[in-house]
Amino acid sequence: MTFTDTTDAQDSATPRSMDPEPNEPKAMDSGPSDLNQPEPESATAPAAEEIDLDDPALYLNRELTWLAFNRRVLHEGEDPRTPLLERVKFLAIVSNNLDEFFMKRIGGLKQQLAAGVHSRTIDGRTPEQQLAECREVIAQIQDDQMRLFNSLMEELEAQDIRLVSISALPDDARERLREHFRTNIFPMITPLAMDPTHPFPFISNLALNLLVRLRYPGGNETYLARIKVPVSKDVSKRLIQVDDVNTFVTLDDLIKHNLDMLFPGMEIESCELFRVTRNAIVEPEAEAANDLLEMIETELRERHFAPIVRLEVQAGMDPVHRGMLAAELGLNEAEDVFEVAGMIAKRDLFELAGLNQPELHDKTHRPGDHPLLANDRRNIFHVIRENGPLLLQHPYESFSTTVERFLSTAAKDPKVLAIKMTLYRTSAGAILDALIAAARNGKQVAVLVELKARFDEAANIGWARRLESEGIHVTYGVMGLKTHSKLIFVVRRDYAQLRRYYHIGTGNYHSGTAKLYTDLGMLGCDEDIAQDLTELFNYLTGYSPPPSYRKILAAPYTLKPGILSRIQREIEHHQRDGGGLIQMKMNALEDPDITRALYKASRAGVKVDLIVRDTCRYRPGVPGLSETGRVVSIVGRFLEHARILYFRNGGEEEYYFGSADMMRRNLESRVEVHAPVESPELRQELRLILDVQLADTRSAWDMQPDGTYVQRQPADENTKGAQELLIQVAEKRLAAAAKHKEKNLRSRLLSHFERRLAANQG
C-alpha cells in the first residue's frame, strides 16, 4: 500500500450494529498532537482591508504541503493507538512516498533549474527556493523516520520480532545463512571493479549498492569495487528470515558478511551501502515518434538512464568515498547527498509489516456486497433498470461483486452489443478477462488505455498489446491530454430498444487498490448521462469536437468553468438569501483559480468546508478572508481517494463526484469526468460520508491559518475514526438488507446515523 496517487502517485499503498451501538464521533476537541510541526510558511496574513487575492502569501506551496501530508502519515506510525505492524507499514509508506517525491517533484524542479526557469509559483517561490525548502523539510522527516525506526524495533523486539545484524547471531545460524548465500545469492552477484581500466559502473534507480574497498595481502594500494544488491522477486527479498523464527537480516548485510567468497584472498578494508534516485520526468518529443506507443517505450528506455537527483549513503561513509560518488554521479555533494542513519530504503519494511500476526494488525476488513446486489442474483442490468442508480463505496463494499460483476455480466449477456472503457491503471484478472471474453463472444469492444500513467507505463503497454491481440479496438486517447477518467459504457438491447448502462468511478479498475483506497462509483442508465458518455467516447476515439454536455462536467473543457460558475452562484445566493455552503472532498487543491474563487466565497461569508488529503493551497481562518473556511485532512488505514463536490445552491442542492482533483493538470490537461448524483437516496449516502469525516475526532487533522496541522483529540480514547464508522455502516446496511430486503431500508438506516450524528454534534 502506498499513500500517494502514483497517483499521479498513484500511485502503491501501501498504504477503525444498530446493536451494539457504534462509537459515534463526539464534539471536536482540537487539542495539540505530539507531531513536530514544520515551520509555518508565513506566520501573519495581510490585514483584511489590504488583502489582495494575488498576494503570494495567501497561497501555500504545493511541494511543502505534500511533504506535510507525509508528516501526518508518519505520525500514524508514531501513534500508539495504531497496531504495531500497521505502524511499521506507515513508516514504509513514507519512505516509498519520499522516493517518488524525488523522482517526480524534485526531478521536475531540477529540470526547471537546468532549463533556466526562474519564474515564481503563485506562492511566490522560484524552483531554486522550492528545492532549498524541500531539502530542509525532508531532512527533518528523515530524522523523525530514524527515531521512529529505532522505537519500532524496540517494540517489535518485545513481540519476538527482530531485525538484527548477522554478527549478533549464533555461529550455527550464521553458517546456515552462509550456505543460503552460497547456494541462492552468490551466483547472481557480479562484482564490478572501479579503476582506470574499468569505467564507473551504471547505477540503477533505487537499487542498493555496496562500495567495497579492498587490498591484496601485504600490499599498500587499495581498490574499489561495486556490488549491486540483487533484491528482486526472482532472487531474494531484502529481509531474509533466520530459520523459522521472526528474526530477520538484510540481504546487504548477508553479502557484507560473505565478501570473502566474492574476493577470495583479498583483505576487506570497508564496505559501505549507497543508493541513487533518478528523475522519472522524461518527456520525448511527440513529433519524434511514429505513434504514442513508440513514444512511451522511448520514454521508458530513457528513464532508465535519466539524471540522478539523489544519492543516499550510510551514516559514517568515508568522506573521500562520498565525494567520489557524488563527483562520478554528477551531483552537488552539499545539496544532493543524504546521509541515512540505520536502514537505507525503509520502504522494504513492507516485508516486515506483512507478517501474519493478526493481533498486531488492524482488525481484518472484508468488503461486503452492495445491499441491493447481495441477495439479488438476477442479471445486474435488470437490477439497475428497476432500482435506479447504485452508489458503490469501496473498500467498504466489494469491487468484485459490483464493478467486476457488471463487466463480466456484460461480457456474457447475449443482449449486450458493445462495451467501451477507459483504463488508467489495472491489474491482471477479472477486468481484462471480461474484456477479452466479450470480444470472443462477438461484442464490439473498444478500450482507451492511458499509456502515460506514471510508473504503470510498461504494464499498460503490455495490457494494450494483449487486448489488441484479441481483436479489441485499443486507442491511446487524445494527443496532449492524459485520460484519467474512470468509465465503463455498455450498450444493451432492452426489449425493442437500445439502452445504455455505465459505471463512473473515482478509482482505478484495479482489484488490489480497491481494497486499500476509499473510492466511489455509480452504476446507472440515465439517458442524459448515457448520451453525454456516448459523445465523450466519440471524442476520445475519433475526431468529434468536444461537446457541451447535458449533465456531466468533463475536463479539460467544461469541468473547471462549471466549478467556478457554481462557486460564483453560491456567492450570489448567499449575498441574497444567506446560508451559502460549499463542501469539497478531494486529494489535492492546487489550482490557483479554484483556490482564488474559494477565497472569494469565504470572504463573502459562504461557509467553505474542504476535506483535502494532501496538497492544499487554501489557508482557512485568515481574518477578513477565509474565516468561514476550514480544511480537514483524514489519515487512516485506507488511503482517501474519493472526490465529492457539494453546493447548497439556495436549497436546490447539487452533488457531484468523479475522477478529478482540483489541480491545474487535472482540470486543464486531462480527460476527467464528474457526474451529478440526483437520487435522494444516493445523495443521503454522500451526505453521510461528508458529515462523518467532518466530525471525525480520531483520524482528522485541522489546518491552521499558517498552513500547519493540528490533530483532533477525542474525549474518549475508544472513539472510532470515520473509516471505521463507515465500515460499520456498510456492515449494518448489508445485514439489515439480508434480513428485511426492504426497498427503502438503505435510506432509513442512513437517516438513523444522520440523526445520531446531528445529536452528537449538538
Image (cartoon, grey):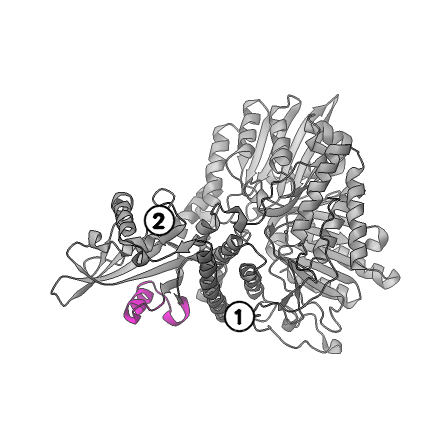
Q: Residue at x 50, y 55 (%)?
A: 93
Which residue is tagged 2? 242
Is 646 located above or below residue 50 in the figure? Answer: above
Inspect this view and state whether residue 679 appears: no
Q: Residue at x 41, y 49 (%)?
A: 246
Question: In this image, 648 relative to 427: left or right?
Answer: right
Q: Residue at x 76, y 56 (%)?
A: 565
Question: In this image, 221 relative to 746: left or right?
Answer: left
Secondary structure under the numbered disc 1 in the rendered image = loop
Secondary structure under the numbered disc 2 in the rendered image = loop
Question: In this image, 257 relative to 474: left or right?
Answer: left
Q: Where in the figure is residue 71, as x and y percent of width and height?
A: 55, 63
Which of 537/327 is in front?
327
Query: What numbered label is drawn on residue 756?
Result: none
Query: What amino acid does circle 1 point to?
Result: Thr
Which residue is tagged 1? 126
Determine crowd level at label 2: few under 14, some 14-19, many 20+ residues with C-alpha closer than 10 A. some
Q: Quadrant of the C terminus?
A: bottom right
Is 373 located above or below residue 307 in the figure? Answer: above
Which of 164/234 is in front?
164
